[in-house]
């Protein structure tokens, strides 16, 4: 059994995640998080919220998951949110064509090549259907829109879509959110929520699904504003896979720091550099293996047309590099598109330090002339005159001014335009902010943390599997056991469990089976600590046994003040401010029992 098989079995058996709707045969691309998985996922989200919203002083919103069609017309999702689909002529199965190429050749990033080229590659490499073996050469590759459609209300008069990303729910509310930020740039708005994509061929468990959770931050900055303060992350080390390394087909990563990468121009945007720095530190904090982690720069063909610099955080999962978050400069694209389509202003008014006096051309046309002359087209003529005045005031020097309406040129007498140069005092300007977007796939981060925490060792000659999860993320923080449920041990253990719950800890009380089996159950779900009540606890000195998950070492914790100090110290352990070893040293606890030293976690 491979480690992948062990992980999949563990995920189902211990209630982390499993295919949804199993009673009805299941449906590809949908998963249910069980009791342990829901808790772990919630803790991942809380850790993200703490680092990227609370500590950065950003706002959080929760928008609807269904939005009307005009939102996605403006965003471009209706026209360009497509994947490449190919239908097998033999069995009728639908496949993602670019994945067929990537999985069966040494070509990477086939998505950037376009449908025609991908169809050519399928023919050139004689690719076959992975389901039935039918030859796929000559089959058409077409674009397939990934959005789930629906109707808002009865009938079909108000079409809508399940959102394919959480970002649009932030962009469409920008005017109100800017007011909450007192119209002061920069400011950030984050959201953790569900998104939907009708994937052609969901695969790899949680990696490619049809319903998933995103944690996205839209950071609105002045296009000419000051860069972020990089002092806290300048020395943070990064493992980068930039464009030139990819184009040279080199597997070598560039090992550098945030400051060095920015200075050398490897990272083009100071804001992107800043977020790569804090993201790297956060990923390490939540247990991602830094030897299996990198930032990969988007190739030119991958990058959205409005983006100037894009990087993906990638983790090695099951031998493959998988994108788990993206960092992009979206420019003013989103706000400008929604302003054009909605008619709403998507700007922030930036006051000058001192009002400025300037001269501006203006027109005040005589409508008593334009009305009879142009009828209902008169407003278009006015708009054209204003546009020419703003762009070419010198054109108003003659006796007539020409304007073009729907391809037809009209000569307007200068006398009726009301053209003049006016002196105006301006107190500020309206600015369309640029957007910096760190976007995290929570399910993929979950899968990464879950796989990277998986360990195997030997305890008392018996193979043990466990999850070395950071205490902050562990679904259960403390296991509390009576050695046996008799002679007052069960009652005392329940008292301790209740005291821990009152302090806000996730606690599991377990009195079923041998103490060794109970330890193993907690090890498998990643519980960092276990407290055991035995005869010494109720008949002797009142001490309890503290067992550490990773080392399997046990220590006696005296009763009274020392036990209270331990319970207080656990808050720092859960928050990542303390370690088990440091707590034991602080309390003067010595290892009195335990299991054999664990062997290499990767040993077979």
Image (cartoon, rainbow, N blue to C red):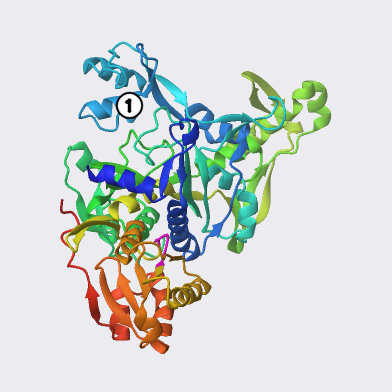
Residue at 47 percent of width and 38 percent of height:
20
Task: Between residue 520 and residue 326, name the one nearer to us.
Answer: 520
Residue 602's place in the image compared with 298, above or below, is below
Q: Which image quadrant is residue 479 in?
A: bottom left
Q: Which residues are magenta?
A: 473-478
Q: Position of residue 34 (x, y in %)?
A: 46, 49
Q: Residue at x 51, y 32 (%)?
A: 77
In the image, taking residue 367 as reference, residue 263 lies left or right, namely left
Sort mark 1 into few (<14), some (14-19) or many (20+) by Cα contacts within 10 Å.
Answer: many
- Residue 553 point in image, percent of width and height: 25, 72
Name the image quarter holding residue 529. Answer: bottom left
Q: Residue at x 57, y 60 (%)?
A: 184
As for residue 522 lying within the magenta part, the answer is: no
Report the magenta stretch's main SS: loop
Left or right of 397 on screen, residue 530: left
Residue nearest the observer in this picture, 239 or 3: 3
Is 47 rendered above or below residue 198?
below
Q: Residue furthest front?
A: 487
- Could you say which is closer to the camera, residue 531 or residue 217? 531
Q: Nearer the viewer, residue 139 or 263?
A: 139
Residue 577 seen by the camera: no
Q: Position of residue 433 (x, y in %)?
A: 52, 50
Can you identify the residue that label 1 sits on? 98
- Compared across the picture, whether 440 is left or right of 265 comes to right
- Quarter of the image with the N terminus in it: top left
Query: x and y percent of residue 440 in the render?
Result: 42, 49
Q: Is residue 423 visible?
A: yes
Q: Secondary structure at mark 1?
A: helix
The answer to whether 170 appears left or right of 481 in the picture is right
Q: Is residue 275 above or below residue 327?
A: below
């Amino acid at each position: 059994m491979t480690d992948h098989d062990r992980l999949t079995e563990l995920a189902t058996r211990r209630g982390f995640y499993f295919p949804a709707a199993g009673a009805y045969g299941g449906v590809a691309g949908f998963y249910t998080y069980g009791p342990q998985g829901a808790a772990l996922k919630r803790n991942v989200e809380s850790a993200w919220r703490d680092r990227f919203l609370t500590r950065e002083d950003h706002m959080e919103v929760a928008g609807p998951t269904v939005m009307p069609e005009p939102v996605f017309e403006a965003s471009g999702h209706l026209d360009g949110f497509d994947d490449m689909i190919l239908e097998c002529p033999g069995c009728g199965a639908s496949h993602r064509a670019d994945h067929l190429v990537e999985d069966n050749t040494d070509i990477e990033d086939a998505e950037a090549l376009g449908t025609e080229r991908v169809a050519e590659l399928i023919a050139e490499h004689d690719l076959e259907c992975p389901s039935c073996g039918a030859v796929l050469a000559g089959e058409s590759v077409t674009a397939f829109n990934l959005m789930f459609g629906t109707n808002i209300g009865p009938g079909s008069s108000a079409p809508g879509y399940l959102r394919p990303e959480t970002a649009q729910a932030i962009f469409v509310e920008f005017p109100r959110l800017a007011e909450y930020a007192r119209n002061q740039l920069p400011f950030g708005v984050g959201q953790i929520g569900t998104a939907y994509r009708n994937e052609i061929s969901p695969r790899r468990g949680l990696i490619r699904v049809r319903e998933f959770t995103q944690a996205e931050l839209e950071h609105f900055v002045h296009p000419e504003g000051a860069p972020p303060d990089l002092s806290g992350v300048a020395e943070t080390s990064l493992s980068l896979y930039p464009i030139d390394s990819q184009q040279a087909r080199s597997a070598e990563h560039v090992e550098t720091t945030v400051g060095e990468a920015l200075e050398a121009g490897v990272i083009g945007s100071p804001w992107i550099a800043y977020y790569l720095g804090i993201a790297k530190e956060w990923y390490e904090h939540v247990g991602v293996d830094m030897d299996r982690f990198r930032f990969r720069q988007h190739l030119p063909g991958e990058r959205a047309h409005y983006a100037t610099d894009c990087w993906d955080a990638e983790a090695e999962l099951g031998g493959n590099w998988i994108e788990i978050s993206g960092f992009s400069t979206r420019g003013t694209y989103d706000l400008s598109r929604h302003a054009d389509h909605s008619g709403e202003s998507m700007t922030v008014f930036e006051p000058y330090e001192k009002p400025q006096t300037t001269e501006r051309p203006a027109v005040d046309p005589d409508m008593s002339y334009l009305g009879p002359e142009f009828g209902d087209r008169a407003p278009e003529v006015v708009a054209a005159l204003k546009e020419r005045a703003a762009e070419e005031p010198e054109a108003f020097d003659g006796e007539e001014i020409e304007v073009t309406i729907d391809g037809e040129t009209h000569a307007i007498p200068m006398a009726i335009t009301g053209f003049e140069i006016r002196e105006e005092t301006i107190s500020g300007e309206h600015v369309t902010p640029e957007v910096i977007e760190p976007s995290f796939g929570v399910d993929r981060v979950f899968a990464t943390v879950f796989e990277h925490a998986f360990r195997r060792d030997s305890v008392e000659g018996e193979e043990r599997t466990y999850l070395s999860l950071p205490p902050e993320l562990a679904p259960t923080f403390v296991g509390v056991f009576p050695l046996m449920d008799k002679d007052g041990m069960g009652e005392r253990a329940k008292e301790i469990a209740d005291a821990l719950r009152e302090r806000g800890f996730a606690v599991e009380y377990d009195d079923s089976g041998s103490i060794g089996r109970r330890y193993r159950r907690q090890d498998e779900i990643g519980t960092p600590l276990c407290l055991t009540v035995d005869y010494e606890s109720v008949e002797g000195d009142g001490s309890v046994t503290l067992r550490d998950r990773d080392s399997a070492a046990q220590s006696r914790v005296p009763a009274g003040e020392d036990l209270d100090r331990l319970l207080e110290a656990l808050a720092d352990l859960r928050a990542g401010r303390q370690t088990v070893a440091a707590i034991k040293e602080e309390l003067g606890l010595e290892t009195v029992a335990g299991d054999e030293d664990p062997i290499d976690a990767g040993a077979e």
